[in-house]
Amino acid sequence: MAAYSEATYGERISDAYDDLYGDFVPSQAQIDTLAEYVRDGLAIEIGSGTGRVTLPLARRGGRVIGVDSSPSMVDVLRSKGRGLPIEAVCADAAEYRAPEPATLVFAVFNTFFLLAEKSVQEQFVAHAAEMLAPGGRLVLETFVPHPGRLPDGPNPGVLPEQSDVVVKRWFPDGVVLFAARNTPEDSRFDYHEIVLRDGEPVRLHPGRMRYMWPVEIDALAAEHGLRLEHRWADWDRSPYQADSRKHVSVYTH
């Protein structure tokens, strides 16, 4: 994918994101867990987008800094967050520094993998560890890599080095397709979300992910003084199993 950067996806989709995914809301269990970790402190969300998680978390009374590399996404969050204890910041995850220690730093819905370079992921974890107050937590939610399985849609049964297309969203007047090409030697896949709607031009929203297995994330966290406190299969705190499709992992000092 030519000229891809951390902000590419957000810049291309910001005007349509809420229309396409506005009904994809966080579970009550997710907001409850994050609010428990914020307590009366500060939460920092990396990849806050248009506020899917930042907004309901702030409505629970927590102070939240929403960090996103896309200026357009930040503008949307800033507008939607008026009157709430939210600061919307445009910054790269690898460079951002909090103005004060945080009780929670989190990246959900595969955002950690969207930091699609190894060095960026490493820098983010290092800086997250530095930003955490004593007893603070880093929370990551990502899919679990499985050969032949894309993170969106059903298992297409393709080989890791092949491309595949699945239906990500269906509307009465159109669909969103997810077309991905995996590069297993780099633990990376490039993708397009292809929006097809009756009477409208085709829209392509490009993205890239660099995926890691949970044990690799644990090792990276340990390098920066963080230990795994909890790992669940979902926000309802169901036990993580070897065949789990995703994991919610909680790290602390």
Image: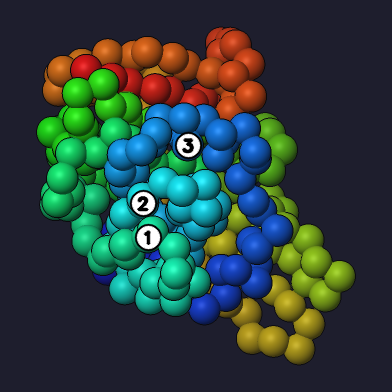
Looking at the image, which residue is at 23% across and 50% down? 93
- In the picture, measured across the screen, residue 136 lies left or right of residue 206, that is left
Classify 88 as above or below 103: below
Residue 133: x, y in percent?
20, 30
Mark 2 and mark 1 residues within 8 Å of each other at the beta carbon = yes
Looking at the image, which residue is at 46% across and 41% down? 108
Give the labeled residue for mark 3.
35
Give the labeled residue for mark 1.
86
Residue 170: x, y in percent?
78, 61
Classify 163 as above or below 8: above
Give the labeled residue for mark 2.
64
Could you tell me if residue 122 is visible in this image?
no
Residue 60: x, y in percent?
52, 47
Crowd around label 2: few <14 · some 14–19 · many ≥20 (10 Å): many
Looking at the image, which residue is at 28% across and 27% down? 136
Looking at the image, which residue is at 64% across and 61% down? 21
Looking at numbered disc 3 in the image, what kind of residue is underneath it?
Ala
- In the picture, measured across the screen, residue 190 lies left or right of residue 203, that is left
- In the picture, measured across the screen, residue 31 lies left or right of residue 42, that is right
Of residues 91 and 59, the one drawn nearer to the viewer in this rendering: 59
Question: What is the distance, in whole Å, between disc 3 and disc 2 at their CAs?
Answer: 10 Å
Ranked by sequence position, the earlier of labels 2 and 1 is 2
Looking at numbered disc 2 in the image, what kind of residue is underneath it?
Val
